[in-house]
Image (spheres, rainbow, N blue to C red):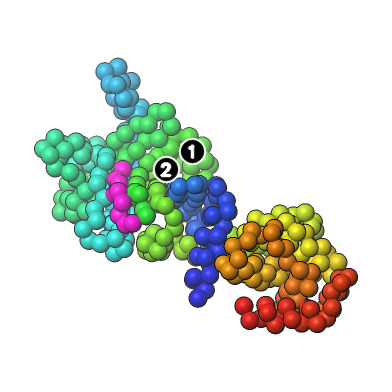
Amino acid sequence: MFNRDWKKKMKKRDRQSSQVKFNAIVDENTGLTLFQREGGLYLVIKKDLNDYHVDISPSEAPVMNQYLKEPDPFESYLAEPKILKEELEPFNIALHTIFGEKKEMSLISIKVAIGSGENDYVTLNESDLLAMDVEPTISGVLEFFEKNESVIGICDRVFDHERGNVILLEAKIREPARGISSINLKIMSSLQQRGLIMKKQMKYAGLQMYTIIKAESLNQDLLDFLKQIEIDWEIIFLRRDFGIEDWLEIECEKNSINLKGFLRNKYDNLGYFDINNITRIAVVNQLNFKIVNYMAEMLDRKKEKQYEVTGSTPDKEPLQKAEIIAAAKLACAYFGVDKKIKLESGVTAEDVNYFEAELVNL
């Protein structure tokens, strides 16, 4: 039940907001950013690979770049091979566990070093297989690394000079499940962040593993995959949701204009006069935000049922004052608040009791 409730809240909030963007820190090495807009979302997960050795040496780029359309980096990278065993293999297992054994990530780019050490090796890359109409995969390269002791690491494969990124490995899977457009994986080094790496890690350069997910929504398959790679989205959502609700409560209790705006945004079936009257009764009786919100929820549900029967718009048949006072009394009772709600002019106790019984039976 708890699980369904938070998903329902997220669905409601997604509908109300055209764009959502926020960050989360998961642990010492892992952070993420979610950017959601109309039509879908992008989820970028970054994991710092600080515990792995990377050898960096000058490259042949000062001369070689005279002959290349796409420039090489001015440094050659050689990252130790256990990155694939310890980082890529668990990711691949998670992919197969959630989406099925037949789902494979295609290797877009990789450069493998084969030799006896960092001063004695030769490289090969994905194009050597593509030239023979063979599409390399993550599962394939993992097995290749496991069976070949001469593999000493992965090297820089792509230099994105416009963004300042040196990419060692990139892989992608399209539509692993319904509602998930793609999952993209990159192991790379950012030239722009070198100062921070030097300051925090006392290293010349660092590597990061990025997971970029494009999806329609955070559906169950995606949530299961995130949990498999140790991203507990439920905790992330609840922390954010509780924080927003606490802040919202303060702002709405301090300013009745904010309260009106919130009620108008959240409850589609309440009209202009309904919201004004609910707010006025809340202010007169000094009701807290939780009580007002629960009142509005009951009254919105009542008008929704009324619409199903009559088809009338929210402002065509405004709520009676007695209905709002009845909702206030029930909301106070629900939260255990002992407060006498003031009767408005023209409202009798009998009217209020009648509408109380009607709201209870919704």
Viewport quadrant of the C terminus: bottom right
Circle 2: is it few (<14), some (14-19), or many (20+) Cα within 10 Å? many
Give the percent coordinates (x, y) of residue 175. 31, 51
| Residue picked out by circle 1 | 193
Image side of residue 45 versus residue 309, left or right: left
Q: Nearer the viewer, residue 15 or 174?
A: 15
Q: CA distance from mark 1 to mark 2?
A: 9 Å
In this view, the residue farthest toward the right is: 345
Residue at left 65%, top 55%? 265
Q: Which residues are magenta?
A: 170-178
In this view, the residue farthest toward the front is: 310
Query: What secondary structure is found at the residue carrying circle 1?
Result: helix
Q: Earlier in the sequence, mark 1 or mark 2?
A: 1
| Residue picked out by circle 2 | 206
Q: Nearer the viewer, residue 165 or 274?
A: 274
State whether residue 161 appears in this view: yes
Dominant secondary structure (helix, strand or loop) of the stretch shown in magenta:
strand
C-beta proximity under 8 Å, tags 1 and 2: yes
Circle 1: is it few (<14), some (14-19), or many (20+) Cα within 10 Å? few
The amino acid pointed to by label 1 is Gln
Image side of residue 33 versus residue 325, left or right: left
Residue at left 43%, top 32%? 163
Query: Relative to 203, does residue 70 appear above or below in the rendering?
Result: above
Query: Relative to 211, does residue 102 appear above or below in the rendering?
Result: below
The amino acid pointed to by label 2 is Gly
Residue at left 78%, top 73%? 322
Q: Nearer the viewer, residue 133 or 164?
A: 133
Give the percent coordinates (x, y) of residue 352. 78, 78
